Image (cartoon, grey):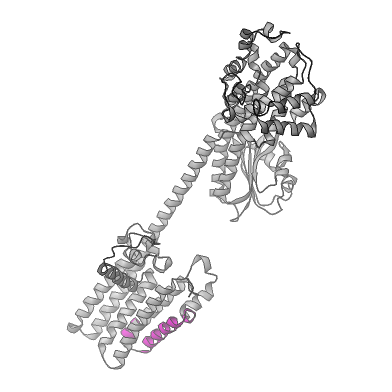
Amino acid sequence: MSDRLGVSAAGVRLHQFVCGALPAVAYLLDWLPPLWLATGLSVMALVSDRWAVVAYVFDRERRPFGKEDPGPHPGLYRLDEVVRTVLLGAGLTALILGRPAGWLPVLAAAATSILEGTTAFSFNLLLYAGGKVLVRRIRRRTGPSPSDRPLGNPNCIVCRAMESAPYGRCLWCRLSSVRWCCGLQTSMLLVLMLVIAFLLNAALEPMVTKLLVTMSIVGVVALSLAITRQTNDLIGSLNNLEDARRHIQRRCAFLQQLTLANSLEEAGENTVTHLADSLGVRRISVMVAEDDALRILASRGIGEEVAERVTVPVPSRICGRVFESGVPLVLDDVGAEAMFETLGLDAGEAMASVPLVAAAMKTAGRKIGVINVTDHGEGPFTQEDLAELEFTAEAAAISLAGQLDRRNLDASNYDAIRSLALAIEAKDPCTHGHSLRVQVWATRVAEALGLSGNRLRALSYAAELHDIGKLAIPDDILKAPRRLSDEEWAIVQEHPRRGVEMVRHLAFLESARLAILHHHERLDGGGYPDGLTGEAIPLEARILAVVDAYDAMTSARPYRPPLSHEEAAAELRRCSGRQFDVVCVEAFLGLMKTSGWLHEDALDAQAAS
Protein backbone atom coordinates (compact mmCIF):
# COMPACT_ATOMS: atom_id res chain seq x y z
CA MET A 1 0.00 0.00 0.00
CA SER A 2 1.27 3.47 -0.83
CA ASP A 3 2.10 6.05 1.81
CA ARG A 4 -0.91 8.13 0.79
CA LEU A 5 -4.49 7.32 -0.15
CA GLY A 6 -6.19 8.14 -3.40
CA VAL A 7 -8.52 10.60 -1.68
CA SER A 8 -7.76 13.90 -0.02
CA ALA A 9 -7.70 14.62 3.70
CA ALA A 10 -10.58 17.10 3.25
CA GLY A 11 -12.59 14.41 1.46
CA VAL A 12 -11.93 11.92 4.27
CA ARG A 13 -13.07 14.46 6.88
CA LEU A 14 -16.31 15.07 4.96
CA HIS A 15 -16.83 11.30 4.67
CA GLN A 16 -16.31 10.92 8.43
CA PHE A 17 -18.76 13.72 9.22
CA VAL A 18 -21.48 12.16 7.05
CA CYS A 19 -20.89 8.72 8.58
CA GLY A 20 -21.32 10.32 12.01
CA ALA A 21 -24.31 12.52 11.21
CA LEU A 22 -26.41 9.71 9.71
CA PRO A 23 -26.48 7.54 12.90
CA ALA A 24 -27.33 10.64 14.96
CA VAL A 25 -30.28 11.33 12.64
CA ALA A 26 -31.34 7.65 12.91
CA TYR A 27 -31.25 7.86 16.70
CA LEU A 28 -33.25 11.09 16.78
CA LEU A 29 -35.93 9.84 14.35
CA ASP A 30 -35.83 6.23 15.57
CA TRP A 31 -35.47 5.23 11.91
CA LEU A 32 -32.88 2.62 10.84
CA PRO A 33 -32.29 3.37 7.09
CA PRO A 34 -29.81 6.24 7.86
CA LEU A 35 -27.97 3.81 10.12
CA TRP A 36 -27.88 1.20 7.35
CA LEU A 37 -26.55 3.86 4.97
CA ALA A 38 -23.81 4.95 7.40
CA THR A 39 -22.78 1.33 7.96
CA GLY A 40 -22.67 0.71 4.22
CA LEU A 41 -20.53 3.81 3.59
CA SER A 42 -18.08 2.70 6.29
CA VAL A 43 -17.84 -0.84 4.88
CA MET A 44 -17.24 0.46 1.34
CA ALA A 45 -14.54 2.87 2.55
CA LEU A 46 -12.93 0.06 4.54
CA VAL A 47 -12.74 -2.17 1.46
CA SER A 48 -11.18 0.55 -0.75
CA ASP A 49 -10.58 4.24 -0.39
CA ARG A 50 -11.92 4.62 -3.95
CA TRP A 51 -15.25 3.38 -2.60
CA ALA A 52 -15.40 6.17 -0.04
CA VAL A 53 -18.22 7.65 -2.08
CA VAL A 54 -18.57 10.95 -0.24
CA ALA A 55 -14.83 11.66 -0.35
CA TYR A 56 -14.51 10.56 -3.97
CA VAL A 57 -17.37 12.78 -5.17
CA PHE A 58 -16.00 15.70 -3.15
CA ASP A 59 -12.55 15.31 -4.72
CA ARG A 60 -13.93 15.10 -8.26
CA GLU A 61 -15.58 18.48 -7.77
CA ARG A 62 -12.38 20.18 -6.60
CA ARG A 63 -9.46 18.39 -8.26
CA PRO A 64 -6.56 18.65 -8.31
CA PHE A 65 -6.15 18.57 -4.52
CA GLY A 66 -2.74 16.88 -4.91
CA LYS A 67 0.09 18.75 -3.20
CA GLU A 68 -2.13 21.17 -1.30
CA ASP A 69 -4.26 18.51 0.45
CA PRO A 70 -2.50 15.14 0.76
CA GLY A 71 -4.52 12.17 1.91
CA PRO A 72 -4.15 10.62 5.35
CA HIS A 73 -1.79 7.83 6.25
CA PRO A 74 -3.43 4.54 5.12
CA GLY A 75 -2.77 2.67 8.37
CA LEU A 76 -4.38 5.33 10.55
CA TYR A 77 -7.23 5.76 8.04
CA ARG A 78 -7.94 2.01 8.24
CA LEU A 79 -7.96 2.18 12.05
CA ASP A 80 -10.74 4.79 12.03
CA GLU A 81 -12.76 2.86 9.44
CA VAL A 82 -12.41 -0.43 11.33
CA VAL A 83 -13.48 1.05 14.67
CA ARG A 84 -16.43 2.87 13.13
CA THR A 85 -17.56 -0.19 11.16
CA VAL A 86 -17.33 -2.44 14.24
CA LEU A 87 -19.30 0.02 16.41
CA LEU A 88 -21.98 0.61 13.79
CA GLY A 89 -22.25 -3.11 13.02
CA ALA A 90 -22.50 -4.07 16.68
CA GLY A 91 -25.09 -1.41 17.40
CA LEU A 92 -27.14 -2.26 14.33
CA THR A 93 -27.12 -5.95 15.23
CA ALA A 94 -28.31 -5.19 18.77
CA LEU A 95 -31.08 -2.95 17.50
CA ILE A 96 -32.27 -5.60 15.02
CA LEU A 97 -32.45 -8.02 17.95
CA GLY A 98 -34.65 -5.51 19.79
CA ARG A 99 -32.14 -4.24 22.34
CA PRO A 100 -32.18 -0.42 22.78
CA ALA A 101 -28.69 -0.55 24.31
CA GLY A 102 -27.45 -0.89 20.72
CA TRP A 103 -27.77 2.86 20.40
CA LEU A 104 -24.77 3.27 22.75
CA PRO A 105 -22.07 1.98 20.28
CA VAL A 106 -23.94 3.67 17.45
CA LEU A 107 -23.80 7.05 19.16
CA ALA A 108 -20.15 6.46 20.16
CA ALA A 109 -19.30 5.89 16.50
CA ALA A 110 -21.37 8.92 15.50
CA ALA A 111 -19.71 11.18 18.08
CA THR A 112 -16.16 10.20 17.19
CA SER A 113 -16.86 10.49 13.45
CA ILE A 114 -18.42 13.93 13.77
CA LEU A 115 -15.43 15.10 15.81
CA GLU A 116 -13.00 13.77 13.23
CA GLY A 117 -14.91 15.55 10.50
CA THR A 118 -14.99 18.88 12.32
CA THR A 119 -11.64 18.95 14.13
CA ALA A 120 -9.41 16.53 12.15
CA PHE A 121 -8.71 14.76 15.46
CA SER A 122 -9.11 10.99 15.82
CA PHE A 123 -10.45 9.90 19.21
CA ASN A 124 -9.83 6.31 18.08
CA LEU A 125 -6.22 7.23 17.51
CA LEU A 126 -6.03 8.67 21.01
CA LEU A 127 -7.22 5.33 22.45
CA TYR A 128 -4.74 3.46 20.25
CA ALA A 129 -1.89 5.72 21.31
CA GLY A 130 -2.80 5.25 24.96
CA GLY A 131 -2.77 1.48 24.53
CA LYS A 132 0.59 1.68 22.82
CA VAL A 133 2.03 3.70 25.69
CA LEU A 134 0.64 1.16 28.14
CA VAL A 135 2.27 -1.72 26.26
CA ARG A 136 5.58 0.14 26.33
CA ARG A 137 5.34 0.66 30.05
CA ILE A 138 4.63 -3.02 30.57
CA ARG A 139 7.67 -3.88 28.45
CA ARG A 140 9.67 -1.25 30.38
CA ARG A 141 10.30 0.78 27.29
CA THR A 142 10.15 4.40 28.33
CA GLY A 143 10.52 6.04 24.93
CA PRO A 144 11.28 5.60 21.26
CA SER A 145 14.48 3.87 20.26
CA PRO A 146 17.43 6.00 19.11
CA SER A 147 16.63 5.11 15.49
CA ASP A 148 13.08 6.48 15.80
CA ARG A 149 12.56 10.15 15.06
CA PRO A 150 9.16 11.65 15.92
CA LEU A 151 7.71 13.48 12.94
CA GLY A 152 4.99 15.32 14.87
CA ASN A 153 4.90 17.56 17.92
CA PRO A 154 6.97 16.17 20.83
CA ASN A 155 4.48 17.86 23.20
CA CYS A 156 1.58 15.81 21.78
CA ILE A 157 0.85 12.49 23.52
CA VAL A 158 -0.49 11.01 20.27
CA CYS A 159 2.57 12.04 18.27
CA ARG A 160 4.91 10.66 20.92
CA ALA A 161 3.07 7.36 21.05
CA MET A 162 2.70 6.97 17.28
CA GLU A 163 6.20 8.35 16.60
CA SER A 164 4.68 10.28 13.70
CA ALA A 165 2.19 13.07 13.11
CA PRO A 166 -1.38 11.68 12.97
CA TYR A 167 -2.60 11.43 9.38
CA GLY A 168 0.74 12.92 8.38
CA ARG A 169 -0.67 16.48 8.64
CA CYS A 170 -2.41 16.97 11.99
CA LEU A 171 -3.47 20.62 12.24
CA TRP A 172 -3.00 20.69 15.99
CA CYS A 173 0.54 19.33 15.99
CA ARG A 174 1.73 22.76 14.86
CA LEU A 175 0.83 24.17 18.29
CA SER A 176 3.39 24.49 21.05
CA SER A 177 1.31 22.64 23.68
CA VAL A 178 -1.07 19.68 23.63
CA ARG A 179 -3.33 21.62 26.01
CA TRP A 180 -4.39 23.78 23.04
CA CYS A 181 -5.51 20.78 20.97
CA CYS A 182 -9.12 21.44 19.96
CA GLY A 183 -9.75 17.81 19.05
CA LEU A 184 -8.56 16.57 22.42
CA GLN A 185 -10.60 19.15 24.34
CA THR A 186 -13.85 18.55 22.49
CA SER A 187 -13.39 14.75 22.52
CA MET A 188 -13.13 14.69 26.27
CA LEU A 189 -16.08 17.08 26.61
CA LEU A 190 -18.29 15.00 24.32
CA VAL A 191 -17.43 11.76 26.12
CA LEU A 192 -18.30 13.37 29.44
CA MET A 193 -21.65 14.70 28.19
CA LEU A 194 -22.64 11.38 26.59
CA VAL A 195 -21.79 9.46 29.76
CA ILE A 196 -23.92 11.86 31.80
CA ALA A 197 -26.80 11.55 29.32
CA PHE A 198 -26.82 7.76 29.45
CA LEU A 199 -26.48 7.72 33.21
CA LEU A 200 -29.67 9.79 33.34
CA ASN A 201 -31.34 7.56 30.75
CA ALA A 202 -33.15 5.44 33.39
CA ALA A 203 -34.62 8.47 35.13
CA LEU A 204 -35.75 10.35 31.99
CA GLU A 205 -38.25 9.82 29.24
CA PRO A 206 -36.82 8.36 25.99
CA MET A 207 -37.60 11.55 24.07
CA VAL A 208 -35.89 13.67 26.73
CA THR A 209 -32.87 11.37 26.57
CA LYS A 210 -32.73 11.70 22.79
CA LEU A 211 -33.03 15.43 23.02
CA LEU A 212 -30.27 15.58 25.63
CA VAL A 213 -27.94 13.40 23.58
CA THR A 214 -28.68 15.39 20.44
CA MET A 215 -28.08 18.68 22.21
CA SER A 216 -24.84 17.31 23.62
CA ILE A 217 -23.58 16.36 20.17
CA VAL A 218 -24.71 19.60 18.53
CA GLY A 219 -23.33 21.70 21.38
CA VAL A 220 -19.95 20.02 21.32
CA VAL A 221 -19.76 20.26 17.52
CA ALA A 222 -20.60 23.97 17.64
CA LEU A 223 -18.04 24.48 20.37
CA SER A 224 -15.41 22.54 18.43
CA LEU A 225 -16.04 24.61 15.30
CA ALA A 226 -15.65 27.82 17.30
CA ILE A 227 -12.47 26.58 18.94
CA THR A 228 -11.21 25.36 15.57
CA ARG A 229 -11.70 28.79 14.00
CA GLN A 230 -10.02 30.51 16.93
CA THR A 231 -7.14 28.04 16.90
CA ASN A 232 -6.73 28.40 13.14
CA ASP A 233 -6.44 32.14 13.65
CA LEU A 234 -3.84 31.48 16.33
CA ILE A 235 -1.95 29.14 14.03
CA GLY A 236 -2.14 31.75 11.26
CA SER A 237 -0.73 34.38 13.60
CA LEU A 238 2.07 32.03 14.66
CA ASN A 239 2.84 31.29 11.02
CA ASN A 240 2.90 35.01 10.21
CA LEU A 241 5.27 35.62 13.11
CA GLU A 242 7.49 32.78 11.92
CA ASP A 243 7.47 34.18 8.38
CA ALA A 244 8.36 37.61 9.73
CA ARG A 245 11.18 36.12 11.81
CA ARG A 246 12.61 34.32 8.77
CA HIS A 247 12.22 37.51 6.71
CA ILE A 248 14.14 39.55 9.29
CA GLN A 249 16.82 36.86 9.57
CA ARG A 250 17.23 36.85 5.79
CA ARG A 251 17.59 40.62 5.75
CA CYS A 252 20.09 40.60 8.63
CA ALA A 253 22.16 37.93 6.87
CA PHE A 254 22.12 40.03 3.69
CA LEU A 255 23.25 43.16 5.55
CA GLN A 256 26.02 41.17 7.22
CA GLN A 257 27.21 39.89 3.85
CA LEU A 258 27.26 43.42 2.47
CA THR A 259 29.24 44.60 5.48
CA LEU A 260 31.83 41.83 5.03
CA ALA A 261 32.12 42.27 1.25
CA ASN A 262 35.72 42.92 0.19
CA SER A 263 35.05 44.20 -3.31
CA LEU A 264 32.49 45.88 -5.53
CA GLU A 265 31.89 42.61 -7.37
CA GLU A 266 31.30 40.64 -4.16
CA ALA A 267 28.73 43.19 -2.94
CA GLY A 268 26.95 42.91 -6.31
CA GLU A 269 26.87 39.11 -6.15
CA ASN A 270 25.50 39.23 -2.60
CA THR A 271 22.72 41.52 -3.80
CA VAL A 272 21.83 39.22 -6.69
CA THR A 273 21.75 36.14 -4.43
CA HIS A 274 19.53 37.87 -1.87
CA LEU A 275 17.00 38.96 -4.50
CA ALA A 276 16.88 35.51 -6.07
CA ASP A 277 16.14 33.95 -2.67
CA SER A 278 13.68 36.54 -1.37
CA LEU A 279 11.70 37.37 -4.53
CA GLY A 280 11.93 34.14 -6.48
CA VAL A 281 13.02 35.93 -9.67
CA ARG A 282 15.09 34.15 -12.28
CA ARG A 283 16.62 37.13 -14.10
CA ILE A 284 18.43 39.89 -12.21
CA SER A 285 20.96 42.56 -13.12
CA VAL A 286 22.71 45.01 -10.81
CA MET A 287 23.99 47.96 -12.85
CA VAL A 288 26.37 50.70 -11.69
CA ALA A 289 26.96 54.09 -13.26
CA GLU A 290 30.33 54.84 -14.83
CA ASP A 291 31.00 57.84 -17.08
CA ASP A 292 27.31 58.66 -17.69
CA ALA A 293 26.50 55.07 -18.61
CA LEU A 294 25.24 51.98 -16.81
CA ARG A 295 27.09 48.68 -16.98
CA ILE A 296 26.19 45.32 -15.43
CA LEU A 297 28.15 44.63 -12.26
CA ALA A 298 26.48 41.31 -11.32
CA SER A 299 23.65 39.32 -12.85
CA ARG A 300 21.73 36.05 -12.89
CA GLY A 301 19.89 34.53 -15.83
CA ILE A 302 21.92 36.64 -18.28
CA GLY A 303 24.82 35.29 -20.32
CA GLU A 304 28.29 36.42 -19.29
CA GLU A 305 29.14 37.69 -22.78
CA VAL A 306 25.93 39.72 -22.91
CA ALA A 307 26.49 41.10 -19.41
CA GLU A 308 30.05 42.18 -20.26
CA ARG A 309 29.18 44.05 -23.44
CA VAL A 310 25.95 45.78 -22.38
CA THR A 311 26.42 49.49 -21.71
CA VAL A 312 23.38 51.76 -21.44
CA PRO A 313 23.85 55.52 -21.78
CA VAL A 314 21.87 57.62 -19.30
CA PRO A 315 18.96 58.45 -19.72
CA SER A 316 18.17 55.98 -22.53
CA ARG A 317 16.19 52.78 -22.01
CA ILE A 318 14.12 51.92 -18.96
CA CYS A 319 17.04 51.49 -16.57
CA GLY A 320 18.58 54.80 -17.63
CA ARG A 321 15.32 56.70 -17.10
CA VAL A 322 14.81 55.07 -13.69
CA PHE A 323 18.38 55.93 -12.72
CA GLU A 324 17.88 59.55 -13.71
CA SER A 325 14.45 59.99 -12.10
CA GLY A 326 15.13 57.93 -8.94
CA VAL A 327 11.55 56.61 -9.03
CA PRO A 328 10.82 52.84 -9.02
CA LEU A 329 9.08 51.60 -12.13
CA VAL A 330 6.98 48.48 -12.80
CA LEU A 331 6.10 47.42 -16.34
CA ASP A 332 4.12 44.46 -17.62
CA ASP A 333 5.57 44.61 -21.13
CA VAL A 334 9.20 45.38 -21.89
CA GLY A 335 9.25 44.01 -25.41
CA ALA A 336 9.48 47.48 -26.92
CA GLU A 337 12.73 48.19 -25.10
CA ALA A 338 15.72 47.18 -27.23
CA MET A 339 17.97 47.02 -24.20
CA PHE A 340 15.96 44.21 -22.66
CA GLU A 341 15.83 42.38 -25.96
CA THR A 342 19.63 42.57 -25.89
CA LEU A 343 19.53 41.04 -22.41
CA GLY A 344 17.52 38.13 -23.79
CA LEU A 345 14.16 39.09 -22.28
CA ASP A 346 10.99 38.19 -24.14
CA ALA A 347 8.05 40.51 -24.65
CA GLY A 348 5.32 40.20 -22.05
CA GLU A 349 7.62 39.39 -19.13
CA ALA A 350 7.07 41.46 -15.99
CA MET A 351 9.92 43.72 -14.95
CA ALA A 352 10.57 45.89 -11.91
CA SER A 353 13.41 48.40 -11.85
CA VAL A 354 14.55 50.18 -8.71
CA PRO A 355 17.30 52.82 -8.51
CA LEU A 356 20.16 52.48 -6.07
CA VAL A 357 20.55 55.74 -4.13
CA ALA A 358 23.11 55.97 -1.34
CA ALA A 359 21.14 56.66 1.84
CA ALA A 360 24.23 58.01 3.63
CA MET A 361 24.48 60.96 1.19
CA LYS A 362 20.96 62.36 1.19
CA THR A 363 21.91 65.98 0.71
CA ALA A 364 24.14 65.25 -2.26
CA GLY A 365 21.55 62.92 -3.81
CA ARG A 366 24.27 60.59 -4.99
CA LYS A 367 23.09 57.89 -7.41
CA ILE A 368 24.91 54.57 -7.67
CA GLY A 369 23.03 52.47 -10.20
CA VAL A 370 19.90 50.41 -10.89
CA ILE A 371 18.56 46.95 -10.05
CA ASN A 372 16.51 45.19 -12.73
CA VAL A 373 14.53 42.06 -11.88
CA THR A 374 12.20 40.09 -14.13
CA ASP A 375 10.86 36.61 -14.85
CA HIS A 376 8.94 36.39 -11.59
CA GLY A 377 7.98 32.78 -10.94
CA GLU A 378 4.89 33.67 -8.88
CA GLY A 379 3.12 36.03 -11.28
CA PRO A 380 2.93 39.84 -11.03
CA PHE A 381 5.02 41.71 -8.51
CA THR A 382 3.21 42.56 -5.27
CA GLN A 383 3.64 45.58 -3.03
CA GLU A 384 5.61 43.35 -0.63
CA ASP A 385 7.96 42.42 -3.50
CA LEU A 386 8.52 46.07 -4.36
CA ALA A 387 9.12 46.94 -0.70
CA GLU A 388 11.73 44.18 -0.48
CA LEU A 389 13.31 45.38 -3.73
CA GLU A 390 13.54 48.96 -2.47
CA PHE A 391 15.07 47.81 0.83
CA THR A 392 17.63 45.75 -1.07
CA ALA A 393 18.38 48.70 -3.34
CA GLU A 394 18.98 51.07 -0.43
CA ALA A 395 21.14 48.59 1.47
CA ALA A 396 23.14 47.70 -1.64
CA ALA A 397 23.57 51.38 -2.49
CA ILE A 398 25.30 52.07 0.81
CA SER A 399 27.64 49.10 0.36
CA LEU A 400 28.37 49.83 -3.30
CA ALA A 401 29.00 53.50 -2.57
CA GLY A 402 31.52 52.51 0.07
CA GLN A 403 33.19 50.06 -2.29
CA LEU A 404 33.35 52.68 -5.07
CA ASP A 405 34.86 55.23 -2.70
CA ARG A 406 37.36 52.64 -1.52
CA ARG A 407 38.25 51.72 -5.10
CA ASN A 408 38.71 55.38 -6.05
CA LEU A 409 40.86 55.97 -2.96
CA ASP A 410 42.92 52.87 -3.69
CA ALA A 411 43.36 54.00 -7.29
CA SER A 412 44.55 57.42 -6.13
CA ASN A 413 46.95 55.90 -3.63
CA TYR A 414 48.18 53.42 -6.20
CA ASP A 415 48.81 56.19 -8.72
CA ALA A 416 50.82 58.04 -6.11
CA ILE A 417 52.87 54.96 -5.28
CA ARG A 418 53.30 54.12 -8.95
CA SER A 419 54.67 57.61 -9.50
CA LEU A 420 57.30 56.77 -6.90
CA ALA A 421 58.07 53.53 -8.74
CA LEU A 422 58.54 55.48 -11.94
CA ALA A 423 60.81 57.80 -10.02
CA ILE A 424 63.09 54.82 -9.41
CA GLU A 425 63.41 54.23 -13.13
CA ALA A 426 63.99 57.93 -13.72
CA LYS A 427 66.71 57.73 -11.07
CA ASP A 428 68.37 54.78 -12.86
CA PRO A 429 67.95 54.91 -16.68
CA CYS A 430 69.19 51.31 -16.93
CA THR A 431 65.99 50.06 -15.31
CA HIS A 432 63.57 51.86 -17.67
CA GLY A 433 60.42 49.70 -18.13
CA HIS A 434 61.67 47.09 -15.66
CA SER A 435 58.73 47.33 -13.22
CA LEU A 436 56.11 47.23 -15.96
CA ARG A 437 57.71 44.21 -17.67
CA VAL A 438 57.94 42.34 -14.36
CA GLN A 439 54.32 43.18 -13.61
CA VAL A 440 53.01 41.88 -16.95
CA TRP A 441 54.99 38.64 -16.92
CA ALA A 442 54.57 37.88 -13.22
CA THR A 443 50.79 38.21 -13.71
CA ARG A 444 50.92 35.84 -16.69
CA VAL A 445 52.89 33.24 -14.76
CA ALA A 446 50.55 33.54 -11.77
CA GLU A 447 47.53 32.96 -14.00
CA ALA A 448 49.21 29.88 -15.48
CA LEU A 449 49.78 28.56 -11.95
CA GLY A 450 46.14 29.05 -11.00
CA LEU A 451 46.18 32.32 -9.06
CA SER A 452 43.12 34.53 -9.44
CA GLY A 453 41.03 37.21 -7.75
CA ASN A 454 42.58 39.12 -4.88
CA ARG A 455 45.83 37.10 -4.92
CA LEU A 456 46.38 37.92 -8.59
CA ARG A 457 45.62 41.60 -8.00
CA ALA A 458 48.00 41.70 -5.02
CA LEU A 459 50.78 40.12 -7.09
CA SER A 460 50.25 42.74 -9.82
CA TYR A 461 50.69 45.52 -7.25
CA ALA A 462 53.73 43.85 -5.72
CA ALA A 463 55.37 43.31 -9.11
CA GLU A 464 55.12 46.97 -10.05
CA LEU A 465 56.26 48.21 -6.63
CA HIS A 466 58.80 45.50 -5.75
CA ASP A 467 61.80 47.84 -6.08
CA ILE A 468 60.23 50.93 -4.48
CA GLY A 469 62.58 50.56 -1.52
CA LYS A 470 65.50 51.51 -3.79
CA LEU A 471 64.40 55.13 -3.38
CA ALA A 472 66.17 54.96 0.00
CA ILE A 473 69.49 53.80 -1.58
CA PRO A 474 72.04 56.53 -2.31
CA ASP A 475 72.69 57.20 -6.00
CA ASP A 476 76.42 56.49 -5.71
CA ILE A 477 75.59 52.94 -4.63
CA LEU A 478 72.65 52.38 -6.98
CA LYS A 479 74.56 53.58 -10.09
CA ALA A 480 78.04 52.31 -9.14
CA PRO A 481 79.82 50.84 -12.25
CA ARG A 482 81.81 48.43 -10.08
CA ARG A 483 81.45 45.60 -7.62
CA LEU A 484 79.89 46.82 -4.37
CA SER A 485 81.64 46.54 -1.05
CA ASP A 486 80.15 44.44 1.76
CA GLU A 487 78.83 47.57 3.49
CA GLU A 488 77.25 48.85 0.27
CA TRP A 489 75.73 45.46 -0.51
CA ALA A 490 74.20 45.33 2.98
CA ILE A 491 72.50 48.67 2.24
CA VAL A 492 71.12 47.30 -1.06
CA GLN A 493 69.79 44.21 0.71
CA GLU A 494 67.64 46.44 2.90
CA HIS A 495 65.56 47.74 -0.03
CA PRO A 496 62.75 45.07 0.28
CA ARG A 497 62.27 45.99 3.95
CA ARG A 498 62.37 49.70 3.14
CA GLY A 499 59.76 49.13 0.40
CA VAL A 500 57.37 47.43 2.82
CA GLU A 501 57.80 50.29 5.28
CA MET A 502 56.89 52.78 2.55
CA VAL A 503 53.56 51.05 1.72
CA ARG A 504 52.58 49.71 5.14
CA HIS A 505 50.05 52.51 5.74
CA LEU A 506 48.11 51.64 2.57
CA ALA A 507 45.46 49.05 3.46
CA PHE A 508 44.84 47.97 -0.14
CA LEU A 509 48.50 46.91 -0.44
CA GLU A 510 48.44 44.76 2.70
CA SER A 511 48.27 41.49 0.76
CA ALA A 512 51.13 42.62 -1.50
CA ARG A 513 53.64 43.29 1.29
CA LEU A 514 54.96 39.73 1.68
CA ALA A 515 55.73 39.46 -2.04
CA ILE A 516 57.58 42.79 -1.92
CA LEU A 517 59.49 41.76 1.22
CA HIS A 518 60.60 38.30 0.06
CA HIS A 519 61.14 38.60 -3.71
CA HIS A 520 64.91 38.21 -3.19
CA GLU A 521 64.72 35.08 -1.02
CA ARG A 522 66.32 31.81 -2.25
CA LEU A 523 65.05 28.26 -1.85
CA ASP A 524 68.32 27.23 -0.19
CA GLY A 525 68.06 30.02 2.40
CA GLY A 526 70.81 32.17 0.94
CA GLY A 527 68.52 35.08 0.03
CA TYR A 528 67.55 38.25 1.84
CA PRO A 529 66.26 39.92 3.96
CA ASP A 530 65.07 37.00 6.19
CA GLY A 531 66.83 33.95 4.70
CA LEU A 532 63.61 31.96 4.18
CA THR A 533 63.78 28.51 2.59
CA GLY A 534 61.54 26.37 0.37
CA GLU A 535 57.77 26.57 0.86
CA ALA A 536 58.22 29.19 3.58
CA ILE A 537 58.73 31.69 0.75
CA PRO A 538 55.28 32.87 -0.54
CA LEU A 539 54.42 31.66 -4.04
CA GLU A 540 53.97 35.24 -5.22
CA ALA A 541 57.50 36.07 -4.07
CA ARG A 542 58.92 32.99 -5.85
CA ILE A 543 57.22 34.08 -9.08
CA LEU A 544 58.60 37.60 -8.74
CA ALA A 545 62.11 36.26 -8.08
CA VAL A 546 62.16 34.38 -11.41
CA VAL A 547 60.77 37.20 -13.58
CA ASP A 548 62.82 39.88 -11.82
CA ALA A 549 66.04 37.91 -12.27
CA TYR A 550 65.34 37.25 -15.96
CA ASP A 551 64.66 40.92 -16.71
CA ALA A 552 67.76 41.96 -14.77
CA MET A 553 69.93 39.49 -16.70
CA THR A 554 68.59 40.56 -20.11
CA SER A 555 68.96 44.31 -19.36
CA ALA A 556 72.17 46.33 -19.74
CA ARG A 557 73.93 47.41 -16.56
CA PRO A 558 76.83 49.85 -16.06
CA TYR A 559 79.05 46.95 -15.04
CA ARG A 560 78.04 44.37 -17.75
CA PRO A 561 76.27 43.96 -21.11
CA PRO A 562 72.83 42.25 -21.30
CA LEU A 563 72.58 38.45 -21.62
CA SER A 564 70.73 36.81 -24.48
CA HIS A 565 67.46 34.97 -23.90
CA GLU A 566 69.20 31.61 -24.22
CA GLU A 567 71.86 32.56 -21.70
CA ALA A 568 69.32 33.91 -19.21
CA ALA A 569 67.07 30.84 -19.59
CA ALA A 570 70.05 28.54 -19.07
CA GLU A 571 71.01 30.44 -15.91
CA LEU A 572 67.44 30.17 -14.55
CA ARG A 573 67.44 26.40 -15.13
CA ARG A 574 70.92 26.03 -13.63
CA CYS A 575 69.78 27.75 -10.43
CA SER A 576 66.40 25.94 -10.28
CA GLY A 577 65.90 24.06 -7.05
CA ARG A 578 68.58 26.07 -5.26
CA GLN A 579 67.71 29.70 -5.90
CA PHE A 580 64.52 29.59 -7.96
CA ASP A 581 61.34 27.51 -7.77
CA VAL A 582 61.40 24.84 -10.52
CA VAL A 583 57.66 25.11 -11.23
CA CYS A 584 57.82 28.89 -11.57
CA VAL A 585 60.86 28.70 -13.86
CA GLU A 586 59.27 26.16 -16.19
CA ALA A 587 55.96 28.04 -16.28
CA PHE A 588 57.76 31.29 -17.13
CA LEU A 589 60.00 29.78 -19.81
CA GLY A 590 57.04 27.90 -21.28
CA LEU A 591 55.14 31.15 -21.71
CA MET A 592 58.25 32.80 -23.13
CA LYS A 593 58.56 30.05 -25.71
CA THR A 594 55.02 30.62 -26.99
CA SER A 595 54.89 34.43 -26.99
CA GLY A 596 58.37 35.86 -26.51
CA TRP A 597 59.60 38.69 -24.28
CA LEU A 598 57.80 42.01 -24.59
CA HIS A 599 59.44 44.74 -26.63
CA GLU A 600 59.13 48.37 -25.65
CA ASP A 601 56.65 49.17 -28.45
CA ALA A 602 54.19 46.52 -27.24
CA LEU A 603 54.76 46.99 -23.53
CA ASP A 604 52.08 49.61 -22.83
CA ALA A 605 49.36 47.81 -24.80
CA GLN A 606 50.15 44.48 -23.11
CA ALA A 607 50.14 46.05 -19.64
CA ALA A 608 46.78 47.68 -20.32
CA SER A 609 45.25 44.35 -21.36
Along the line of sight, the residue nearer the viewer: 216 or 425: 425
Residue 309 x/y as whole percent? 74, 40
Q: Is residue 29 visible?
A: no
Residue 32 x/y as whole percent? 35, 89
Left or right of 423 on screen, residue 133: left
Q: Does the magenta stretch include residue 28?
A: yes
In the image, residue 156 sits, relative to residue 220, either above or below, namely: above
Residue 129, picture quadrant: bottom left
- Quadrant of the image containing the C terminus: top right
Residue 122, picture quadrant: bottom left
- Among all residues in the image, which is located at the extreme bottom? 97
In the image, residue 303 sits, relative to residue 190, either above or below, namely: above
Along the line of sight, the residue nearer the viewer: 43 or 101: 43
Along the line of sight, the residue nearer the viewer: 74 or 443: 443
Along the line of sight, the residue nearer the viewer: 519 or 42: 519
In the image, residue 281 sits, relative to residue 459, either above or below, namely: below
Magenta segment main secondary structure? helix
In the image, residue 88 sits, relative to residue 534, either above or below, namely: below
Residue 591, picture quadrant: top right
Q: Is residue 111 visible?
A: yes
- Among all residues in the image, which is located at the extreme left? 203
Left or right of 367 on screen, residue 121: left
Residue 8 x/y as whole percent? 48, 72
Q: Magenta stretch: give its range.
A: 24-52
- Among all residues in the image, which is located at the extreme right? 601
Q: Is residue 4 magenta?
A: no
- How many labels sit on residues? 0
Q: Which residue is drawn at 30% across and 68% down?
A: 186
Left or right of 326 on screen, residue 124: left
Residue 18 x/y as whole percent? 40, 79
